[in-house]
Amino acid sequence: MTNRERIVQTLLCGKTDRAPFGVGIGFSTWGETLKRWRSESGIADLNPAEYFGYDKDFAVVPVEYGPCPHFEKRIISEDSEYIISYDYRGLTMRNRRDGGSMPDFLESPVKTWDDWKRYKAERLQPNLSERLKNLDPFIAKIVNVDAPIQLGVYPWGVFGTARDILGAEEFLIGFYTEPDLIHDIMETYTDLWLTIFQKVTEKIKVDHIHIWEDMSYKNGSLISVEMIEEFMMPQYDKILAFAKMNDIALVSVDSDGNVKSLLPVMHKHGINTFLPFEVQAGNDIIEFREQYPNLGIIGGLDKNVLMDTAPKDALHKELDRCELILSMGGYIPGFDHLIPPNVSWSKWCYFIGCIRKIILQT
């Protein structure tokens, strides 16, 4: 079985020779974590994927899903701790210099219908020659690589993108005060992405469409199921119909937070893979596996058991859960988010050794 076949069939809950090893979000790290590991390992150019021999991950098609042309990036101000900058999407944000936290979004580019009409006219036209300029070089490089091909990537999603360009507060209020604007933003982006998807699938076989949302917090979805159905699912239905028409096996959604109300409606419409199942928000991948036996699951192990101060028996408890869900199928092991810098190199090596033994029997 090829690596490409193994990943796809695993997430389709089909029969495989073994689970994928080292694939997906659970094996990604913060920049500060990698810096720590390089220091503790003594390997200046440490690449964990190469060091541990992870299976090849999804090969993401490098096309432009957002503003084209980009906004001009610039630094607005900076001090010893923070940098305030303007990014290629037109977002103003504050970041820690050390990269040790999520950005603080200060201002978004769309505040009114007129802003949106201008943004759409100037930045969201198909402009396919520019959006697809890296496609042919990618195809030439990927032809001999044993990896599933993915369309869609962070930070593009029906909910997530609309929230970013409006700002979270204005976006959530807008469901009540400007529902037509919310509908138009979601539809415009989705139709643009489908135009791009079509051009890509004319040139290369695609295995996976990924939708990034991050639309839940610790108590559940940021909007009701009724709003999800009204505003989001018509766009999801178009994406899912495209996937079916083009024999694209996997359509996945990424959302942090508690997804217990989010997953049922999306699964009902045809989403067949989900990640990363944040444990501290109340998600239990064993419960989800029992409830959705045909759902592809990525991640869902508690990253906090890797902390320097966490006892080793907590890590073994997560490894036991990992082994159990692996026996149930349809699962790619990993933690429930990026690995933070309070995880030592020695503890990561221990965890990887245990996972290798479970999956590869070596």
Image: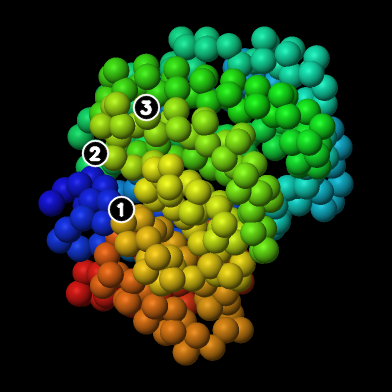
Task: Point out the frontmost of discs 1 and 2.
Answer: 1
| Foreground residue among 342 and 311 | 311
**Quadrant of the image occupied by residue 184:** top right
Residue that badge 3 annotates: 242
Task: Point out the frontmost of discs 2 and 3.
Answer: 3
* Residue at image location 41% in from the left, 72% down from the top: 286
Residue 308 vertical placement versus 173 (above, below)? below
* Residue at image location 58% in from the left, 24% down from the top: 187
What's under tag 3, amino acid-wise? Answer: Phe
* Label 1 residue SS: helix
Residue 11: which disc? 1
Q: Is residue 30 left or right of residue 298?
A: right
| Foreground residue among 63 and 352 | 63
* Residue at image location 15% in from the left, 61% down from the top: 17
Residue 324: image location, x then y, percent = 32, 77
How far apart are the two marked residues, 2 and 3, measured between alpha carbons?
25 Å
Disc 1 vs disc 3: Cβ atoms closer than 8 Å?
A: no
How far apart are the two marked residues, 1 and 3, measured between alpha carbons?
19 Å
* Label 3 residue SS: helix
The earlier-in-sequence mark between 2 and 3 is 2
Residue 319 vertical placement versus 1 (above, below)? below
Residue that badge 2 annotates: 145
